[in-house]
Amino acid sequence: MSYDQVDIPTQGAPIRLSDTSELDIPSNPIIPIIYGDGIGSDVGPAAQKVLTAAAEATGRSIAWMRIYAGESARNRYGENLPTDTVEAIRDHRVAIKGPLTTPVGAGFRSLNVALRQQLDLYANVRPTYHIDGVPSPVKDPSAMDMVTFRENTEDVYAGIEMEAGSQKAEQVRSFIESEMGYDETMHDGPIGIGIKPITEFGTKRLVRQAIEYALENDRDSITLVHKGNIMKFTEGAFRDWGYELAAEEYSEVTLTEDELYDEYDGEAPEDKLVIKDRIADNMLQQLLTRTSQYEVIATMNLNGDYMSDAAGAQIGGLGIAPGGNFGDGLCLAEPVHGSAPKYEGEDKVNPTAMILSGRIMFEYIGWNDAGELIRDAVEETISNGEVTYDLHRQIEGGDKLATSTYADAVVDKIHELA
Ligand code: NAD
């Protein structure tokens, strides 16, 4: 594959998918990286430095391939999302990106959504675990150790929306009222309409990924989160298809909550994964009151967005919340936070979220030792009171470091711990 719109590294070997759909990982993989807009120019290079150090400390190297999206792509190539950017990620299987700005207003679709859709990255995965020393608004942040699998391609985020006053919106209203017979449910006057598609296919592949993760990582339970009490044929269907998938493909290793109490008196055998479900609003309470009972969450796009931000706040907030988007044989890691344009170029914000997103990427390619090293180094640095401004203002004492100095401190810890 030849590219015109990327910085091709002179060394390294590509990650490839084998005939048996396994990833072949060389010890010097080529990994595409998008620094991103706004604070991406601060956190991108900082994370890159830390990830390089962790790879080298565990006997590997990374051949970074700079690729471009957002403002940097507009400046270089006159377009927001060059084809080569998408193709480089597809070809190299594993990549990392910083945040991309979505200007508010018509005619500009979210580049993040476009990337997820074009690459069919159908699961947005957000781990929320507490790092010692990180200030939190709750009494026991260490009770949270959860991974949210958020469906990434459907729901009201699918982009099927009709603006108030448009011909399409009026056509859909008239179809719904006269053809479908829902004639008293919508008020007269301008109306905006959004469509909420939830498919069996989309649900089952997401829940499958969540179950596989839970089994591989020795988790005890998985919770399907939905508003099926109100939205029976979308969110209720998600719940039903989730249970159906577990029964069809994982009946040997899973138990429903009813079976847990009827057959095992509430004590799950070690080799069984409990599948349960919760209504989304109740779940937001339970995250605070019964935190440790939730380990892996599988949910739809909108619920997942709310839920993972709320969970993220419990363990220290956006500056440290990592994420990853996964398709079949594809991983695009990215922090949960956005481009915070007002801090762009100030060398001020916290790069931990992007650094820990790199940990997710490393775990995806089996570099778990390098991932652990990153986590331990971040924990030691923060416990030492060496933090960026966002955490500094919440703790007593400590040193307020710039983005780049903090990254250097984490690299030093990597060298000490390796
Ligand atoms: P944001 O996450 O960029 O910033 C909100 C606030 O959170 C900031 O003002 C800052 O106080 C804090 N914050 C964020 N990241 C931080 C960090 N690393 N360290 C310390 N503090 C941090 O959210 P926003 O202001 O709603 O969005 C700004 C832009 O980012 C928008 O264009 C939005 O569309 C985009 N966005 C992109 C992504 C993505 O690329 N995946 C995600 C969310 C938002």
Image: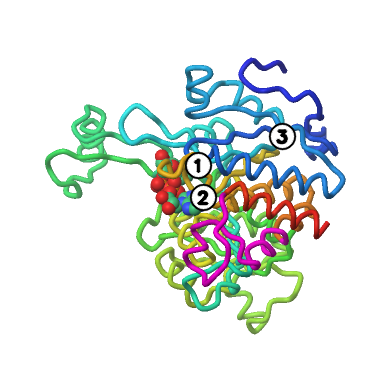
Report, in whole angstroms, how far the alpha carbon at label 3 lies from the one at label 2.
24 Å
> Which residue is drawn at the image coordinates 55% and 56% (left, top)?
388
Q: Position of residue 108 (x, y in %)?
A: 38, 29
The amino acid on which the numbered mark 1 sits, given as a three-letter code, is Ile
How crowded is the residue under tag 2: few (<14 C-alpha within 10 Å), some, or many (20+)? many
Q: Can see residue 205?
A: no
Tell me the residue that label 1 is attached to.
39
Q: Looking at mark 3, is its residue's CB closer than 8 Å to ligand 1? A: no
Reply above or below: 275 against 75.
below
How many residues crowd around disc 1 within 10 Å: few (fewer than 14), some, or many (20 or more)?
Answer: many
Residue at the left extreme? 188
Q: Which residue is mark 3?
A: 31
Q: Nearer the viewer, residue 383 or 207?
A: 383
Say above or below: 330 vs 249.
Answer: above
Is residue 90 visible in the rendered structure shown here?
Answer: yes
User: What secondary structure is found at the residue carrying circle 3?
Assistant: strand
- Contact between marks 2 and 1 (CB within 8 A): the answer is yes
Mark 1 Cβ inside 8 Å of ligand 1: yes
- Look at the picture and state if 39 lies above or below 394: above
Residue at position x 43%, y 56% from top? 306
Tag of residue 349: 2
User: Is 45 one of the magenta-colored residues?
Assistant: no
Q: Quadrant of the N terminus?
A: top right
For label 2, the SS is loop
**Is 270 in front, or is 150?**
150
Residue at image x 56%, y 48%?
Answer: 335
**Image check: 42 left or right of 370?**
left
Q: Residues within 10 Å of mark 3 (few under 14, many from 20)?
A: many
Magenta-drawn stretch contains 393: yes
Which range is magenta? 376-402
